[in-house]
Amino acid sequence: MDAETGADDPRLPATSWAVLGMLSFEQELSGYDIKKWADWSLKLFYWSPSFSQIYSELKRLEKHGYVTSRTVMQDEVRGKRVYAITDTGREAVRNWSRTAPVEVPVLKHGVLLRVWLGHLTEPERLREIVTEHRDNSERRRAEAAVDAEAAHDETAWAYPEIALKWAERYHAAERDLAEQMLGDLDELAASGRATEPVPLPPDSPSLAPRLPGVPSTE
Amino acid sequence: MDAETGADDPRLPATSWAVLGMLSFEQELSGYDIKKWADWSLKLFYWSPSFSQIYSELKRLEKHGYVTSRTVMQDEVRGKRVYAITDTGREAVRNWSRTAPVEVPVLKHGVLLRVWLGHLTEPERLREIVTEHRDNSERRRAEAAVDAEAAHDETAWAYPEIALKWAERYHAAERDLAEQMLGDLDELAASGRATEPVPLPPDSPSLAPRLPGVPSTE
DNA sequence: CGCAGTGTGTTTCTAATAGGAATACAAACC
DNA sequence: GGTTTGTATTCCTATTAGAAACACACTGCG
């Protein structure tokens, strides 16, 4: 049970499946196309890949027989390599999509890290940071709305449309969450118990210290 | 203007600042402590680091003079290395926190990727995946709520508390967004225009294809 | 005409990050 | 007495991010 059966599936990273998944829309695409497309839509809820990664993923997928490539000439001189999914490849992505475990979404929220470390920053500056994030979120919401609308026309984009509608709501929520947090920050500032650069004399000498956010009651 | 002034700040990756930031709460911490703490709280809005990374960050921070370390003996035999922030280190994180640009949060949402590729999966299976994600989100919301509550007691954790309250609302929103998306999926299934494994005969031969989600009207 | 700037298309290099496995020993459980 | 769980750290490898370089075509401007 190695190859041929198609039921073994070499454990590829999620990014490989994302690229292969893009090709499952049955268009021949170049690495450059994939990058552009990902920068448009996919980045609103899933990663904005680098060229280097896309191109190396494509090579790997080809080595696995999941895609084939051919060179297309655009003029007399310049050509480009376009990739198409194979039957094996289609089978493999399907299989991945149906059976992969439901993973925790990866979130690295730099703004929240800085709020968490709020004692390091002047309250007004922190406010500025969160405000800027709120405005950025609204911009991304609008982007998603435009893309979702555009997807609405083509019936083949029914699922992308749902994903983009999700993205629209997600970024709207981010915007509102930022707004709410501004309220919390103002409240803290008003209560006076902010600013001090962290008290906490080191009185629990070396054992697992009582750490913020989690009680030792467990 | 190289060292000594403290105003140059070697461009460290965000993770370094996160670790240094944790030490800015003025507790001596071992690498293990940092890992545990991050797994509790920080992972709800910012990264769950690996041991290897934490330990190498600590070494780098020490090389920069941002932290110092000493070995603490717990019994006759076993010791551990605990780290404390220095004045230079404190100055550097403050500076980073105040002046770093507001970055786009990194989101890699595997569930959404699979919805986007919904044509690959049976509608019922897709529903299961989204449902599981919704339930996971509720679990994380509850976790954040517990931590936020715990942070409420110590006045020094005012900012962590705000961040955790944000996390609570964020994961509640994720839960609700998943619920709404289930509605969209049901609607699509009811409308009948799902299931087909993507039509789209390759009729735009090689030029930038009309890609989902973005009109060529620009 | 020449040259800058922008867009297509791909490769190369390095740093950062994720994740598992290995090591070591102590304490708790059965 | 042996297994599991928790503390504490290191090593190794694969994945991922990001910049830069290269190559050429097309557009606009003075």
Image (tube, coloured by chain):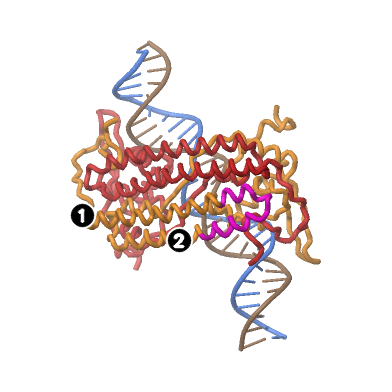
Chain colours: A orange, B red, C blue, D brown
Element carrying mark 2: helix
Give the residue at mark 1.
A191
- What stretch of residues is rendered in magenta? A142-164
Task: Pick whichever, A60 or B39, lies toward us.
Answer: B39
The kind of residue tagged 2 is Asn
A35 falls in the magenta region: no
Give the residue at mark 2.
A136
> Which quarter shows the N terminus of chain A?
top right
Q: Earlier in the sequence, mark 2 or mark 1?
A: 2
Quarter of the image where one finds residue A85: top right
Same subunit, tags 2 and 1: yes
Quarter of the image where one finds residue B3: bottom left
The number of numbered discs placed on residues in the rendered structure image is: 2
Say which residue appears at 46% left-offset and 42% top-offset.
B175
The kind of residue tagged 1 is Ser
Task: Pick whichever, A208 or A115, lies toward us.
Answer: A115
- A211 on left or right of A55: left
